[in-house]
Image: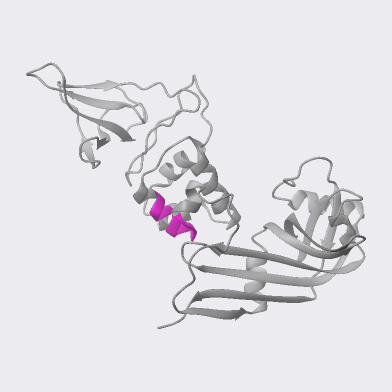
Amino acid sequence: MRAHLGDQLVIDSPATGGTRRDGEIVGLHHADGTPPYDVRWSDTDQVTLVFPGPDAHVRHLEHASGATPSRPDAPGATPARPRPDRAPSPGGIGRRVAAERERQGLTRATVAGRAAMAPQYLAYLEERPADPGLGTLTRLAGALGTSVEALRGGGIDLPPGQGQALLHPELRELDADECRALLSTHGVGRVALTAPVGPAVVPVNYEVIDDEIAFRTAPGSLPAAAVDSEVAFEVDHLDETAGQGWSVLAVGPARHVTEPDAVRRLADGAHAHPWAGGEREMWVSIRPQRLTGRRIGPAPR
């Protein structure tokens, strides 16, 4: 008997020839797909270790493109090797988990340890179109400091800040080291500048390299108007569910980076390409001269 993650284990009824019990195989203990299996039973939603007997057989599921396979969230489960005839893409949840983990600079082992799950399962979730259960999502959200709704993609079209405020909030000023640590996670920030049309605030993908905030844009674009002027750069993070968040503000002069060695250094250190796409090879660098930040969280009780 051999199985893949997402297949069904069916226990036949000797009296009727029908199905007595069935469940989803959510964990393999051998890379070749042989028993035993971790099975999530359809009647109880509980996961147990099963050594199939003669009354059991595996119902193989062909995970077509776009289908949703299993939830291998048993803590000790080891995912199977990918089938050679298909190359599944990660699902939306997996992409969001991976993006948030990488944004915070965390390893899979660190996040898996915080979430009390096997690193192999976290790899499975990030790389395949898996559908983890609520318990798994809750542990992952806690490990990443985010919410289940955010990992599911809920509310992505809504403006931030519509969640409930804390009952006893505390607003705390961040010191320079805390600001640098939060700023260095890189991602998307906002540049406040004075353009020919007047004041403007523009979101940009940014990097922090050698204590400089750098972003790529196109000559003649609105962000390019930051060059040769003092600008403000802001980045923040909100946890809508918990009513918590932080913001960091950097103020300093912006310049156009033209030196070949400096351009190469910035390009080599970049983590991602600008979301706006197109030819955006003009590097603008901001050297902060003033760095401040604030954090909202629950007040000590």
Give x and y (percent) for residue 255: 89, 62
Residue closer to the observer: 106 or 256? 256
Q: Quadrant of the C terminus?
A: bottom left
Q: Quadrant of residue 16?
A: top left
Residue closer to the observer: 228 or 1? 228
Up/down of 115 relative to 53, above or below = below
Main SS category, magenta section: helix
Chain part drawn in magenta: 137-147
Q: Quadrant of the N terminus?
A: top left
Position of residue 106 in the picture relative to residue 186 (left or right): left
Residue closer to the observer: 34 or 148? 148
**Farthest residue toward the top?**
17
Q: Quadrant of residue 285?
A: bottom right
Position of residue 6 in the picture relative to residue 198 (left or right): left
**Farthest residue toward the bottom?**
301
Question: Can see residue 209?
Answer: no
Question: Can see residue 79?
Answer: yes
What residue sits 46% from the left and 73% below the top?
A: 166
Give x and y (percent) for residue 293: 65, 75
Q: Is residue 142 magenta?
A: yes
Give x and y (percent) for residue 5: 36, 31
Give x and y (percent) for residue 45: 25, 41
Up/down of 18 relative to 40, above or below = above
Q: Is residue 285 magenta?
A: no
What residue sits 45% from the left and 39% below the top?
A: 124
Position of residue 37 in the picture relative to residue 286 (left or right): left
